[in-house]
Amino acid sequence: MTPLIAVLFAILQGATELFPVSSLGHVVIVPALLHWPIDQASPSFLPFVVMLHVGTATALLLYFWREWWAMLAGLLGRGEPGEVDAQRGLLLRLVVATLPAVVIGFALKKPIQHLFASPEIAAAFLIANGAVLIIGERLRRRRAGNGFGIGQLTLRDSLVIGLFQCLAFLPGLSRSGSAIVGGLTRGLDHEAAARFAFLMATPVIAGAAVIEVPHLLHHAAAARGMFGTAVLAAIVAGVVAYLSTAFLMRYFRNHDRWALGPFAAYCALFGTLSLILIPFGA
């Protein structure tokens, strides 16, 4: 992988990881369409992807550092009793919402991992992702009054959102999009649903990187050859992920009516075009 392709790959991953358009789908489809010289079976590819995940998780941690710091303070019992209870409650909701990804991820990783390398299947699921976003908007529970915040989520709500997030184990379905849709169905507005989805994503993405550490160590010799390129790509992915998060939080704050519509249309169009073009590019 050349440094230019590595940077382009990092930009692609850093943006699509947070936008509700499926990073996994794009990193399978785009290289196939553009004939990028990427060997995903290479021993050095996995360490490269792990570095990208580290960059993205770091960006999310930096963007939401105040929330994580407040939760840490609450966990340690620092602050007013009401605030401590609120922060501990938020942390518990995030733990409950993350559990399905841990359990289902271990159960489904081997049965579905062969799908990851198929651009055609990823493109089909990308179209399905657009349908999920539209259905989420239609199933949205609208609350009267001053809105429905994360603090009002029950543990059951959190579990349901976590189950929605697990749709992303299928290549082409977005983790952030699925989690946001889950939040909408439980009564959150778009901004609150996105915030909860991004807070959930931090341990999930970081955990995905940690899980691959044994494989990373196994291929350490191959990884050394492109360590500098991987570090550069991780930084690029982190910067793009941070900017993407800032944009999306502002977007969802200002567009609480059918905010997922443009992303759904994009997924349907790009997925359809990919199914048409991929056979000709093979």
Image: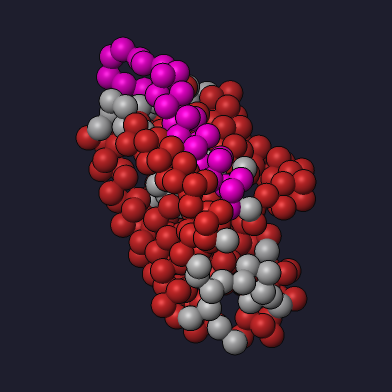
Quarter of the figure that contains the C terminus: bottom right
Q: Measuring 31% from the left and 43% from the top, which residue is drawn there?
A: 249
Q: Measuring 40% from the left and 35% from the top, which residue is drawn there?
A: 264
**Res. 157 image quadrant:** top right
> Which of 155 and 44 lies nearest the eye of the viewer?
44
Q: Main secondary structure of the magenta part?
A: helix
Observer able to see residue 237: no
> Which of 35 and 162 lies nearest the eye of the viewer?
35
Observer able to see residue 12: yes
Q: Measuring 53% from the left and 78% from the top, which residue is drawn there?
A: 1
Q: Does residue 193 appear to the left or right of 171 in the view shown?
A: left
> Which of 53 and 7 lies nearest the eye of the viewer?
7
On screen, residue 248 above or below 256: below
Q: Does residue 126 appear to the left or right of 191 in the view shown?
A: right
**Res. 256 image quadrant:** top left
Percent x, y of residue 260: 36, 33
Q: Measuring 48% from the left and 60% from the top, which residue is drawn there?
A: 33
On screen, residue 70 above or below 52: above
Percent x, y of residue 46: 63, 69
| Magenta highlight range | 119-148
**Res. 193 image quadrant:** top left
* Type of colouring: secondary structure
Residue farthest front in this picture: 280
Residue farthest left in this picture: 254
* Residue 146 part of the magenta segment: yes
Percent x, y of residue 128: 52, 34
